[in-house]
Amino acid sequence: MKGANCLKIMAVDYGDSRTGLAICDEGEILASPLQTVFEKNFDRCAECVAEVAVREKAALIVVGDPVNMNGTRGERSEKCALFAEKLRGLVAVDVVMWDERSSTVTAISYMNDINKRGKKRRAVLDQAAAAVILESYLNYRKNRRE
């Protein structure tokens, strides 16, 4: 059911070579893999992600924050924070960071369950990780509303 506070949200699993994107419906029910951006240039990658967000009419962007398992922020987390900051300058919607600990591990587990391996896995792994991040964020939003 589409609520008053529901948004079309896009999640980003930023990577140095591949950046996975996922999106949810406006009812915030289903998080779906969207696409992978194959771009190594930091600025160009952010521009590509911003273009997709505009095209998809995302009302909010969630960037995965790879916090260390002990809760500290490492080099990867800092790079993702810089990426989120860059996105904020390129889009007219809010960009938030979301703890993504174990999202890739969870995505790999899903892929094993459906027997997706090798090149097929690599092609969609980052999108699946973004969908895991988005699913976690959607659950958080749902629990806050209830």
Image (tube, grey):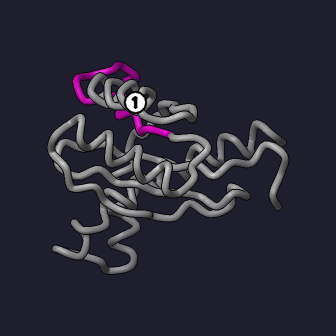
The residue tagged 1 is 84
Q: Is residue 84 left or right of residue 30?
A: left
Q: Amino acid at mark 1?
A: Ala
Q: Can residue 68 be found in the magenta stretch?
A: yes
> Which residue is at 51% across, 49% downward?
10
How many numbered tags mark residues here?
1
114 in relation to 139, above or below: below
> What are the residue bounds of the magenta stretch?
62-76
Q: Can residue 83 be found in the magenta stretch?
A: no
The quadrant the C terminus occupies is: top right
The answer to which of 129 and 10 lies nearer the viewer is 10
Question: Residue 129: percent from the left, percent from the top?
Answer: 38, 54
145 in relation to 26, above or below: above
The answer to which of 19 and 57 lies nearer the viewer is 57
Q: Residue furthest bottom?
A: 115
> Which residue is at 44% across, 64% downward?
33
Q: Is residue 101 left or right of residue 134?
A: left
Question: Residue 99: percent from the left, percent from the top?
Answer: 46, 34
The answer to which of 30 and 90 lies nearer the viewer is 90
- Predominant secondary structure, magenta span: loop
Q: Residue furthest top?
A: 72
> Which residue is at 21% across, 55% downward?
38
* Dot 1: element: helix
Q: Is residue 9 left or right of residue 1?
A: left
71 in relation to 141, above or below: above
